[in-house]
Image: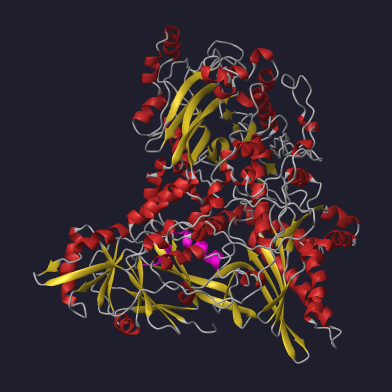
Amino acid sequence: MSVRGIRIWRRNDARFQPSILVEKNGLDGSLLFQGGAIATLDSDSTDVERRSYQKIVDAYGILGVLAITKDEAVLVAVTGVLSVGQLYGADILKITNVEFISLRTFGSVENVDSRIIDLQRLLSSQMFYFSSLQSYDLTRSAQHRDSHDCSDARFFWNRSLHFSFQRYGIDTDNWLLKCMAGSVLVRVVYVGANTGRVALISRLSCERVGTRFNVRGANYLGNVANFVETEQLLLFDEKECSLLQIRGSIPLFWEQPGVNVGSHKVKLRAFETSLPAYHRHLSQLQHRYGEFAIVNLLGRKEGERVLGDAFKTQHKSSHFAPLVDFIDFDYHAQMKISKEAIVQLKKKMSPHMTKHGFFYSMGKEIVKRQTGVIRTNCLDCLDRTNAVQTAIGLQMSHDQVAFLNLNAGKVNVEQRVEEILRDLWQKNGDQCSTIYAGTGALDGKSKLKDASRSLARTIQNNLMDGAKQESFDLFLTGAAYDPRLFDRACNILPPSLIQESYYYHEYADAVSQLVERSPEIAEPQSIKIFVGTWNVNGGKNIHNVAFRNESSLSHWIFANSMTRLVSVEDEQLADIVAIGVEELVDLNASNMVKASTTNQRMWCESIRKTLSEKAPFVLIGSEQLVGVCLFLFARPRVSPYLKDFAVASVKTGMGGATGNKGSVAFRIVVFSTSICFICSHFAAGQNEIRDRNEDFATTLKKIRFPLGREIDSHDVIFWLGDFNYRINLSGDEVKNAVRNGDYAKLVENDQLTQQKALGQTFVGFNEGQLTFAPTYKYDTFSDDYDTSEKCRAPAWTDRILWKDQRKKGKTQLLSYDRSELKTSDHRPVGAVFKVETFKVGGRKCVELIEDVVESMGPPDGTIIVSIAGKPRFPPQMFPPIHEKLKELGAQVQLSKFDDGDLWIVLNSGEMALAALSMDGLKIGGTDQINVKLKSPDWAYALKPHLSDFDLESFEVTAEEEALLGGTDGAVFEFADEDEDAISVSSLTLTGSAPDRPRPPSARSEAISVAKLEWPTEQPNVLSTSMPTRASSASLANSSWYEHVPPLAPPQSNNNKSPPQACLFNPFTQSAPSPAPPPSTIPLPPTRGASVGPGPPAVPVRKAPPPPPRPVIPPRPKNM
């Protein structure tokens, strides 16, 4: 790979649609990109075609095709590399520059999309590597290569860029590169006359990737941020010795805003909501690595204390607790006392290192396998983690050298290898830190150097990480078609199906069909949602609401007029409660710079207490933007069915410069229905209608959730808040109408109603009838409207609107009214909705996919046309055949001659099926044409292959609900002693966390949050039966896991027999590539070629199968 073996040509003739030709040294023929389709040409056809093309670039390799918009796709070519060494005879190359070649336009792709510049900067940042030989796949460790014949999708970063090629049967192994992200360091070691290599390879997972303060913790699938597998590799002659370690963010739902230098303010989500993700993550580690131990390096200062305690509590509550050792080591505190403290940690880890061992092979014979790994983490999984992993690697290097028998007659080899590895580990730490935090690692050796890097990290986090995060998302997911369509497909289909096949990324029509027909396989599940909004006027009188019986929040949340919430019967209560509060703090200059969260904490506790009077509720999320705050609670029985929770906010005050006005938004998926809640506070003033409309438009445009999801990407949207729209009447006229109950007159003059009718705001949204008096503006603790000098006219400023975007959406408003709480100049408003969500069953889903795949035709849309009785297709017959295809409504994307036949790529598989009707047709009265499909067995090839165990993961059992839903949600803790670092964590989880004693008056008295402590002991209620594979509905069948590979139930370990490592690689979700656009000018077929066959199987070394896992009986009940 020392030469640029790829040549890329472009046809610049504007009379024809854009076309790209790619040649590669060592391969006959070329690839032709045209009209969104890809085909191979033989050497003769390539020579002919090249005459009308111009060379545009030479490259070292091709990463694939990336869809950057619905109408634009680019070919990603590697044009700059640096060699970092050789492994297994292959050059390991670091990417230093890439170039994007547009497949749809003639001009520069940078002019089409400005994000390309940021993406080019990311791909050229020297964090991506590839191997020059197919025989060595960098995404796989040594042990993985001997047990699998496919790439490890966790570390295969450009996998989605291969999908377009797979769709058209191109051999991706021959034409494309496989790149990984992370660090590869190689050094040569001489042992007498022999030459060996020492390498350190850190593979960064692409399953949950992002920058330091944009991506933290775990997602609902159990994938964690900054997950890195590091392989310490020693190669001498035909011997190889490999040691694996892993690191990753703490597998809980948590965030850490990065605004200040050294900021450690951690925000935790509810304890119960993290439980499924935690079990999912540990189950994945068990599947991939066998046994593992956890080394937690978090300290006891600032937010780390809360996060560390939550981690320990979650682990003690887990069924993995008796199987997985949890080593807690406050690295900073211990190392401050003595630099030798690391020795004590090594003693704790030593039994695991000895037991797990490492992988060793001689030639093609596997002598020893690694049976487990150590998972290390700190807050960022950077500096402290680097130090501990270095210690593990250096200690194990002595055993590796001894196993390789390198010390015979060479006393200094062990020392030399250790010195090399020490240097490699230091450089590895810097490179991993640069990817995640933007600077090298903080090693503690130089305070000036560490301070400089901390400052650089802060600048990086606040100024550049946003663009870098967007580039990550674009590279991994693309933007092939409507994000709402693909998002709905992801909510309906299991990720295991979406991730393993190009079909759901490349074929928009098929995805559309699956979404449209999803009601056929969905079971309706009705839930009730309470939505409330209240401007509390700076929260001055919060104690009057929270702690005085005469003015209770229950009068609002459980108002008598809202009959659906009055009953204490379980089935009558709301399943989800969303409450928005405006002017939570005074909107002064100091709060706009840094708003206090004291009121947020108090309101959160007060709402939770009020809800707990009727039934248990779990706090899902709480977010504050200066004075706007949104709270989301859910019943524990619903929590197993919630996933993909995300938060977004936008400032709209003073043109977006300040947060005195703005919006906070939550998104969440319930079963397979996505729901968005937005709480807004718009511009004030009687005549500022345009400003309010602009605030709405700004919020709608700028609210962005992960993976580019927008507000309109959701199935159901609830928009609540103080919108400040007034009534175009004088104060006296409004008051008279209120006294007379003439609300119709007020509605006619309501600004929001008028602007909505004009299409200026809230287009498509619904609102209940305004049958209650205007909610603003009152004298505090009075029923009188404003009697101050300004004497503002009453208005319905506080509103709740909703929109159901499903074709047959069934969101029903049950009640819409105000409450008579008088501690603010506004009255609170509440609404109760009945929302029909849909639960998808596994087997029905597979049946629907099979039906859609068969009805949509072959994805390549290719037909083969021949003339009966003629060995070669006459070129003059192409125009009449093209006309026949036009009559059918088919559009020709690409055509060519191959082996005497005419190959035509149409715009869809359905058109290819329709073209079969031309088979046997006579043209010109004499010539009979024969038409067949290039891929007649497409339906079988794309048939989903799911085991019964996979399908069982779609069902939720009573045991699962008991495990995840049995909580009263009574106790939760905010963050550390710093009031501005808010963390919400409900802890009393039956079967998961210790019960706490509650005073008899707990429902009527305030709970002192300052005295709350995290549980440290495992409760007796955990002595339930351990789930087995046959009955593991408990974790595998939760709706949380309804669209993910099933959990592997942990095995008991009574006989201490180590399970064998079981490496497995579920593919990451990626966005689709664009559908081909119609051909504007029918091109004459290209002569002589063949669409490439599928990639051949890659030979792997034969290895003796690992011994089976011991069969362990389930844990007995009532231990």
Viewer-proximal residue, 708 or 227? 227
Task: Report the magenta residues as a range.
Answer: 107-126
Image quadrant where residue 544 sits = top right
- The percent position of residue 1035, horizontal first and vertical second, equals 63, 45
Indicate the quadrant containing the N terminus: top left, top right, bottom left or bottom right.
bottom right
Q: Residue at x 79, y 33 (%)?
A: 1012
| Left or right of 564 on screen, residue 232 | right
- The percent position of residue 106, horizontal first and vertical second, equals 34, 68
Is any part of residue 959 visible from this angle? yes
Q: How is the image coloured?
A: secondary structure
Magenta stretch contains residue 111: yes
| Left or right of 283 on screen, residue 1081 | left
- The percent position of residue 1002, horizontal first and vertical second, equals 75, 22
Q: Residue at x 82, y 66 (%)?
A: 354
Q: Is residue 1023 above or below residue 829?
A: below
Q: How many marks?
A: 0
Determine the residue located farthest toward the top in the rendered image. 740
Viewer-proximal residue, 906 or 657? 906
Q: Is residue 1097 above or below residue 1111?
A: below
Magenta stretch contains residue 949: no
| Left or right of 563 on screen, residue 929 | left
Is any part of residue 486 visible from this angle? no
- The percent position of residue 953, horizontal first and vertical second, equals 56, 47
Q: Residue at x 76, y 52 (%)?
A: 323
For the stretch drawn in magenta, the main secondary structure is: helix
Determine the residue located farthest toward the bottom in the rendered image. 193
Q: Residue at x 43, y 13 (%)?
A: 734
Indicate the quadrant containing the C terminus: top left, top right, bottom left or bottom right.
top right
